[in-house]
Image (cartoon, rainbow, N blue to C red):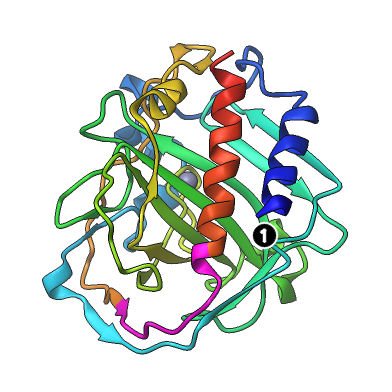
Amino acid sequence: MQCYVLILLLAICTCVQCTNAKTARHSFGYEGENGPSHWGEDYDTCKGKYQSPIDIEEHLVTQVELPAIKFEGFKSEPTTNTLTNNGHTVMLQLNMTKMASLSGGPLHGNYIFTQLHFHWGSNDSQGSEDTINNHTFPLELHMVMYKETYGSFDEATRHKDGLAYLQYSMRYTMKRIRTRHLYFTYNGSLTTPPCLEVVTWIEFKMPILLSHSQIEAFRKLKSEEGFMTHNFRPVQPLEGRPVWFNVMDKENNAPVLQQTMGFMLVSMLLIYMR
Ligand SMILES: [Zn+2]
């Protein structure tokens, strides 16, 4: 636990790019002519068949028992941290002597952590990208990982199994949900242009709990167009894709990871709320 707090303090101390974006170039947006319904005009791949996000209907998922997900290196102290407002989202990158990695679950091979970022809505009734039974949440965290054998993030985007995204929803509820090892998984795409269909999505059912004011802080971030009040893509057609729900409730490190991400999130919010 102390290690995680240290990571957060380092993130604050080394945050040199976390001012509101003023010079970021915008090739896509979430409103009007730049909005999601127009992405396909500039990016053919955004018109693909197996896009993300999707609505997950719990009564239609296929229950499976997958191997435990293994998280490695997430307790290690990063050498540097970079927190960036890129005009589309707020993103945290870590430099580590040995980058944190992920394996197991639905994945074949080892996946290297590269960055995490967020999607949110203009009010508490929207914000998450994937929905569950058509229900949305105010904030969603994506952790981006690339397959180690491909050597780099860019090379990994050329392969169907190149990327893995971990997805956590953020909610206000204090209701205890005892499903911390359980997750949905399906094959989809990046949720921003170029919308490449190279992502294995892993969506944990256990939420990270936040306060209203913490989530509100994201809506105060600015891009060239003004306040970034929302940055989520609407759900896309499932097109018959299977969605699996892992019911193997084996102990793994997912809860620890969630605590880590929760602390990181809170520290970033503290920065932006100054
Ligand atoms: Zn994302």
Disc 1 designates what residue?
Answer: 113
Judge by depth and name the residue closer to the eye, 247 or 59: 247
Percent of width and height locating residue 172:
30, 39
**Quadrant placement of the C terminus:** top right
**Is label 1's Cβ within 8 Å of ligand 1?**
no
Q: Can residue 113 be seen at all in this image of the molecule? A: yes
Q: Is residue 189 above or below residue 229?
A: below
* Quadrant assignment, res 228: top left
Name the element at disc 1: strand
In-image side of 82 versus 255 (left or right): right
* Quadrant assignment, res 123: top left
Q: In this view, does 249 lie above or below 194?
A: below
Residue drawn at point x = 67 percent, y = 59 percent: 113
Residue farthest along the left direction in this orientation: 59
Is 96 magenta? The answer is no
Residue drawn at point x = 38 percent, y = 63 percent: 204
In-image side of 229 versus 26 (left or right): left
Percent of width and height locating residue 110:
66, 77
Percent of width and height locating residue 41:
39, 37
Q: Can residue 198 be seen at all in this image of the molecule? A: no
Is 253 magenta? The answer is yes
Percent of width and height locating residue 215:
40, 29
Q: Main secondary structure of the magenta part?
A: loop
* Quadrant assignment, res 205: bottom left
Residue drawn at point x = 42 percent, y = 87 percent: 66
- Magenta extent: 245-255
Say few, some or many: other residues with alpha carbon within 10 Å of mark 1 (under 14 / 14 to 19 / 20 or more): many
In-image side of 267 versus 76 (left or right): left
Q: Which amino acid does label 1 sit on?
A: Phe
